[in-house]
Each structure stands twice: as C-alpha cells, then as structure tokens.
Image: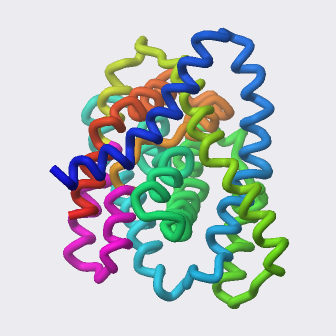
Amino acid sequence: MEAFERILGIILPVFAVIAIGYAYARLRGDTVRTDMAAANRLSMEILSPMLVFSALAARDFDVSQNALLMLAGVLISLGSGLIAWPVAKLLGYDVRSFVPPMMYNNCGNMGFPLAVMAFGPPGLSQAAALFMAGNVVYFTLGIRIIEAGHPERRTAFIQFFLSPIMLAMIAGFAFALLHLHLPAWLFEGIRLLGSATIPLMLFALGVRLLDVNFRSWHIGVVGAIVCPVAGLAMALLLDQVLHLTPVQRGQMYLFASLPPAVFCFLIAEQYRQEPDKVASIVLIGNLAAVVFVPVGLWLGLR
C-alpha cells in the first residue's frame, strides 16, 4: 500500500499539469495553438537546452558512474526498434512510420518531471543521461529510417548535432567529462532558466492532446502498447546483466515505460511520413502512459 501511494504521489502531479493544459486548450480553442507555438519554440531553442546542459554539467554528475546507465538507454532504444520492426511487418504498417516512435520515448516532456518527482532533484542528472542516449539513437538511426523513403530530404549527418538541444548535450557532456565548472552565479542562472522547461513541457503536452485523432486508432493503440512493453522487456533483460545502483535501476525502468515522444509527430510532419498515423501513435501512447508508467515505477522502485 505504501509503494502504491508513493507511485500515485509521483504520477498524479505530472498528469495534473497535463490535464490543466488540456482543459485550458479546450476552454480557449484554436488560439491556444498559436500561443503555444511561440512557447514551444522557446522551450526547444532555449529552455530545454539549458535544462539538459545544467543537468549534465552539474557537479554531482559523473560520467564514469553513469556510463552503464547511458548504455542501458541506448540498448533500450535500439532493442525497442528491433522488437517493433517485425510487428510493423506483420501488421502491414510502414516501418518508417511505426519504428522510429518506438525508439524515441517521451524522456523529455514526461521523463524529466517524473524523474524529479520519483528521485528528487539529483535524479535530473541521470534522467538527462538517458535523454542524451535516446536522442543519439533517434537522431542517427531513427531519422535515417524515416529518410529511407525520402532521398530528396536527406539531411547531412553533421546537421543532427547542430540543433540547440544536441549542442547543449555535447557541451554538458564535455563539462562533465573534463570536470569543468561555470561560475556558481552563471550556472545557477542557467539552471533556473532550464527549470522552467518542466511545467511548460507538461502544459504543452496537455494542449497537444486536443489534437488526438482516432481515425488511425488501430496503429495508435498498437504503438501505445508496443513502445512501453518493448522498453520494459529490454529493461528486464538488462537488469540481469548490468550492475546498476538502485536509483539507476529505477531510472532505467522509468525510462523504459515512457510513451513515444511528441517530437516524433513533428518530424513525421516535416518529412510528410504519414503524420496522422504518427500523431495517433504519440497521442494515444501518452494517454496510455497512465497505465504503463506506474508499472515501470513499480518495477524500478521495488
């Protein structure tokens, strides 16, 4: 009973903010989407990079101590894609639409706040390490899968690493690896700026739920199940072979249980890769997180 109450205490505040964003969008209508476009751009270009950099460059983050956790994140992302591939083939889905969202979970919008709620502020650094692992896999292999049918839109490899979020990850990782430190006043300012990302991400996710499209409900439901189930299957396997600390183990299971990332829909829209189906996968998957995230937390907090 105590464990159940702890899990409720972790997930309810997160889903409460998402629900507020959804209710506000329902109340205000289409104008909210226009308003959120600027907020989302601010989050992607400034706030999120500051959050990731401050988490990785924090004095309490040690690369060597979190190397196995980052490896687990990479293997969960790759393994989820490997499991999703035959599912897509079996059900007749386009691999380019189905597999990449299975490889890239919502470790930003939902993962960061859940990690903080479950493991306290120190948990943010380890969540950032998993976020980095997931991003590296998606922005290399995941994007290449999507581009396989769009040779005219092929992106130069170096461009993957020139986005603000990737530059922040590289800089934060370099600071951690070389044990570099910014002046305390500057680092605190960056950390404070980055902390605004978490509630804004959750609120934006609630607004995005207004666009749930049930026309492609079949692929959406399948994706909502395959993503966390494949992730948790990989985590259970890795739990037997990787010697993680209890907190790292909890972070691994939480990461594995997360739904597909909202960003997958934006990429599908950019490449015109069945964005309606990817939207269903993402949005129904995030609704299904109410079921799968508690499972992941229960497995990780045992």
Residue 94 in view in this figure: no
Residue 5 picture location, percent across and down: 25, 47
Query: Magenta segment, which residues?
Result: 227-254
Name the quadrant of the C terminus. Answer: bottom left
Residue 120 picture location, percent across and down: 47, 64
259 is higher (above) or lower (below) than 211: below
Question: Which residue is painted at 56% across and 42% down in the image?
Answer: 146
Question: Which residue is painted at 30% across and 75% down in the image?
Answer: 246
The verdict on residue 129 being magenta is no
To which quarter of the image does residue 50 belong?
bottom right
Question: Which residue is painted at 62% across and 32% down in the image?
Answer: 204
Residue 158 picture location, percent across and down: 75, 63
To which quarter of the image does residue 284 belong?
top left
Residue 4 in view in this figure: yes
Nearer-the-camera pick, 242 or 5: 5
Residue 180 picture location, percent across and down: 74, 87
235 is higher (above) or lower (below) than 85: below
Predominant secondary structure, magenta span: helix
The verdict on residue 230 being magenta is yes
Seen from this angle, which residue lies furthest left? 1
Question: Which residue is painted at 70% across and 67% down in the image?
Answer: 53
62 is higher (above) or lower (below) than 36: below
180 is higher (above) or lower (below) than 137: below
Left or right? Give the position of 279 relative to 37. left
